[in-house]
Image (cartoon, helix red, strand yellow):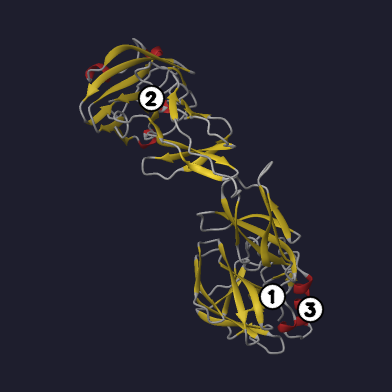
Amino acid sequence: MSRRAKDVTISSLVAGLVMVLTTMSSAVTSASASAAAGEPAGAASSWLFDFGCEKSPVTDGYLPVANTTLYDGSRGYGLDRVTNCRDRGQPDDLRRDFTVANSYGFLVDVPNGDYRVVIVSGDQIASNKTDVSVEGSPPQTMSTTTGSFAELGISVTVTDGQMNFTFSGDGRINAIGIAHISPPTDLQVDVTRLRPSPSVSLAWKPAAGAGRYNIYRKLGGQSEFTRIGASSDNAYTDKAVELGFTYTYAITAVGDSIIESAKSTPVTVDVIDRSVEPPSAPVGLTLEESIKHDTFTLQWQRVKHAREYHVYRANGAEGSFSRIDTMSSTSYTLYIAPSTGCCYDFYYRVVAVNDGGLSGPSNVVHVSWGDGGSRDLVRVVKPDKLNSPRAAGVGAQYFVDRDFTITTLPDALAGQLLIPGANDDKRLTGPADYLEFTLKRDATVYVAFDDRGKDTWWPGWLADQGFQRTDLTIDTTDAHFTVFAKRFAAGDVTLGPTAATSASSSSYFTIVTA
């Protein structure tokens, strides 16, 4: 019994390979028609196969491969044995069903030549691990979790008039696409412009059967290509390059059947004028902190003939530097939000750029908070929801469950470690060890209580534990807070609940200084 065809709209299954499965090429349509008329599959140049059960729907434009479709020379394709099949009904006609066995093969008669092959394997209701070998190649494993589908794209050369697939492991196959399409050749850098804005223009020989081309690029030092664009012509201009950097490009051809070729031979280009001397490294890099404790200014001396400057940052002394911005001026303002988690430890340097390339790096400057004081000072034990210490400062959020922020803060507490409170817990009267944390060094613990609780509900544990009321106060966007303090030795610290008795109240929050 033949499988019935059914129109369907299907999302992209193979990035860059099967982009619109309901709009097939004339080559694939011809392949389907040829097979239906009894012509061998080898008479076409592109093939799309939908694997599954005899009564399952077939995606429009695909050739059906049921679990009972054995190879036949007149048809030109088929399985080497009868398998099992499953039809899950979802997510679409192509992926809902599949053939399945722990060891079987699929054969397709094709002219000798180079091909691009796409295989889809997965299961809507189960995990999957299917091993695939094509033309005797080492098996590749396609692993998926429940409800996901893997796509494997490989290049295959056929020399004996037949393409042979071997499936093992779980052996789930949803679909196979084959296209006789070669990668573009003779990729060249046509023009490299440095002014007024850098750009790289590429050109290559048209590939037979290509409907469009995908352009891939990687930056010097990177291992993987990233697709940056597409072109319907055999040329492309990349306007997103930057002075002083090295780029490598590769092109793929995409046929009418929306199957992508292998990548072309890559070309590498320096966006540099070798006749120009690179600039010298910037000197005199300094970092100045504002009185707000969250804004910093980097400054350095102007470099002769520099067109622009790159600012780099590393997280920690052993971290790698990454570029964070580019500017033409010799100063850069950094804003490190008070809500930045404890603790930050940033290193900065600057590089000058001109048409001749990049300079060496400047001297390094360093900014952190808590270094020698609050850094790694506290480990919150419980409750877990309060385990998000941050830098105390104007603009810092002091609750984990509200957007209220600090508007004024004593200088003695600015930049120190803030353990936020939870305002939803303000009326809790227990447990007695509501907040527990460990001090790695001797420290002063400050707790800020809502002034509205004065002489009414401020908890007794403050006095019991020896906390003293200070002259320090904190203003916020919600309330005014009075600060209590006590010096603790290194070790465990336990604080009780807020125990507010009025709805017009706030939970406390904690600031720790070494």
3 or 2: tag closer to the N-terminus = 3
Q: Give the residue number, with chain letter if any, for mark 2.
A: 415
Residue that numbered label 1 is attached to: 180
Count every numbered label the image shows and give the total: 3
Q: Residues within 10 Å of mark 3 (few under 14, many from 20)?
A: some
Which marked residue is nearer to the observer: mark 3 or mark 2? 2
**Above-or-below relation of 489 to 505:** below
Mark nearer the N terminus (2 vs 1): 1
Q: Which is nearer the eye, 297 or 474? A: 297
Query: Closer to the camera, 142 or 459?
Result: 142
- Left or right, 484 with respect to 292, comes to left
Q: Which residue is mark 3?
A: 33
Point out the tag, 3 or 1, that comes first from the N-terminus: 3
Q: Secondary structure at mark 1?
A: loop
Q: Residue at x 72, y 79 (%)?
A: 2
Determine the residue positioned at 34% across, 29% down: 370
